[in-house]
Amino acid sequence: MMPNTSPKIALAGVHKAFGSKVVLDGINLEIEDRSSTVIIGGSGAGKSVMLKCILGLLNPDSGTILFDGFPLDRRSRTKVDFYGRIGMLFQGAALFDSLPVWENVGFGLLQGKRMSRIDARDVAIEKLRRVGLDDDVANLFPSELSGGMQKRVGLARAIASNPEVIFFDEPTTGLDPIMADVINELIIELVRDIGATAISITHDMASANKIADKIAMIYRGQIIWQGPASDINNSNNKYVDQFVHGRAEGPIRVGVLDE
Amino acid sequence: MSLLATSGRLAIEAITETGRGVLFLKDTLAHGLTPPFYFRTIFSQMMRIGYNSLPVIGLTAFFTGGVLALQIYVGGSRFNAENIVASIVALGIIRELGPVIAGLMVAGRVSAAIAAEIGTMRVTEQIDALITLSTSPFRYLVAPRLFAAVLSLPILVAIADTIGILGGYIVGTQSLGFNPQSYIKNTADIIEFNDVFSGLVKSAVFGFIIAFMGCYHGYYSRGGAQGVGRATTSAVVSSSIFILAANYALTSLIFSE
């Protein structure tokens, strides 16, 4: 086979509006295979909506989203087994609070891939170990865990089926700086071990600098800058500079009336 | 002008809501009636919806049967018709009050609980997580609750009917001085298959309404704790109204001949 140089995921002209409020205003972005792309941007810039459009949790108004060159829409997601090939770490971990930890981790294996409970439990425990959690955590319920541990369980769930692409929604938000770094380290290791493509959205620059090969910045529903992570401090882009250095003064106006 | 705008907005909202409800129903049927079925979830939901509702249903039915006996005795004595107490208690409970009161009580208990649970899952992104784990929320969350409610309500209503008649019997024999044997005989003589059947059909429909409204409002809840609260209220209010409306429609349909 020819080496695959086409992007793993490509967005072209993706628009999404809620009523009169335009959130995505023609997003064009290509995600290289086996790379780690971080999308940065302020609150309300459209990061989450973009992610939800890729995941099929929202339908874009126009534009195309390609997965391995295959256009994604409501129907085709089942055809290419999209959800069997991706993993997602939600911002609040989004663990199912009615199920014990191991069933959370093995959920995709039990429901999506119809694995037996015994096998799924073994995989779940292995994945929990992989994110640094003891075996006895497996039988606890999510509400009995701290925020950092819930994030780890969420990570274990995201990698449980060895996905090709892993999405991270604000992976470090709400964690203390040390736990945030632990999660960043885990993300780097796991993505490398599985050989997955990683797509993260964050406004935490420390996290972005740590986990990204490539950074893209979204502002007012458009990608206004993208490049290698090493260039983020020399972007020659006033918007990026302002964001990276966290300055209130600059071209990005964060007005109270802006929303 | 503002009156026109308001009525227009209300009309659009009503149409939107109806359309969304129909689409929700379509997705539920499309996913819920095809395998895999979650039998374990259906069973545990039946325990929650049916079994755990027994105390409240039993108490309500008992007092309703009792008060019905009292009222009919007082009312009937005005034209010397006290002896119809047993018959009217039995018919009233089985045809109307059993299904409606059980339906309304379960609507308050279960519709609210379902809306709160699914609504919380929505606002904490657990429903999104289900989708990303190749699991349809309609199949995994909605369908088992609907099955469980449709199966549980007729059983609950059969129990409510029995306890309601027992309530009437106890009041009738203990405080109104009816002869126990003739009370039971009058009750048994008046009940026909159609009465029981119609009550059970009604209750299955009510079960569907209760679970559907709970799931629907929970599924579309927005905006954190407040949104979940709103969803819970809407679920109880709408399921109660739909139960009463469906009750009228079904009664006129079943007893039209």
Image (cartoon, helix red, strand yellow):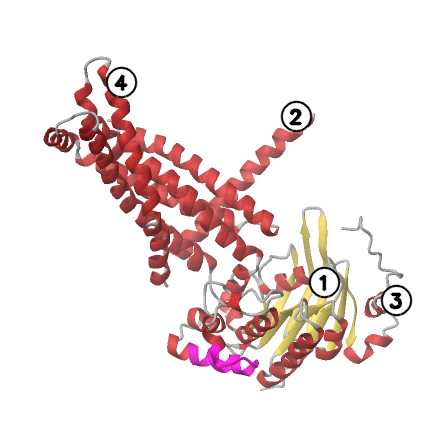
Residue A135 is inside the magenta segment: yes
| Residue receiving disc 4 | B75
| Residue receiving disc 3 | A238
Residue B3 is labelled as: 2
- Identity of the residue drawn at 17% across and 29% down: B173
- Identity of the residue drawn at 17% across and 33% down: B192
Judged by depth in the image, the label closer to the viewer, 2 or 1, is: 2
User: Amino acid under label 4?
Assistant: Gly
Q: Quadrant of the N terminus of chain B?
A: top right
Q: Quadrant of residue B254?
A: top left
Judged by depth in the image, the label closer to the viewer, 4 or 2, is: 4
Pointer 2 and pointer 1 on the same chain: no
**Magenta stretch, residue numbers:** A121-136
Q: Secondary structure at mark 3?
A: helix
- Asked whether the viewer can see residue A61, the reply is yes
Disc 4: CA contacts within 10 A as few (<14), some (14-19) or many (>=20): some
> Which chain hosts label 1?
A
User: Amino acid under label 3?
Assistant: Lys
Q: Earlier in the sequence, mark 4 or mark 2?
A: 2
Pointer 2 and pointer 3 on the same chain: no
Is residue B82 toward the left or the right of residue A30 in the image? Answer: left
User: Between residues B200 and B72, which one lies in front from this camera angle?
Assistant: B72
> Which chain hosts label 4?
B
| Residue receiving disc 1 | A27
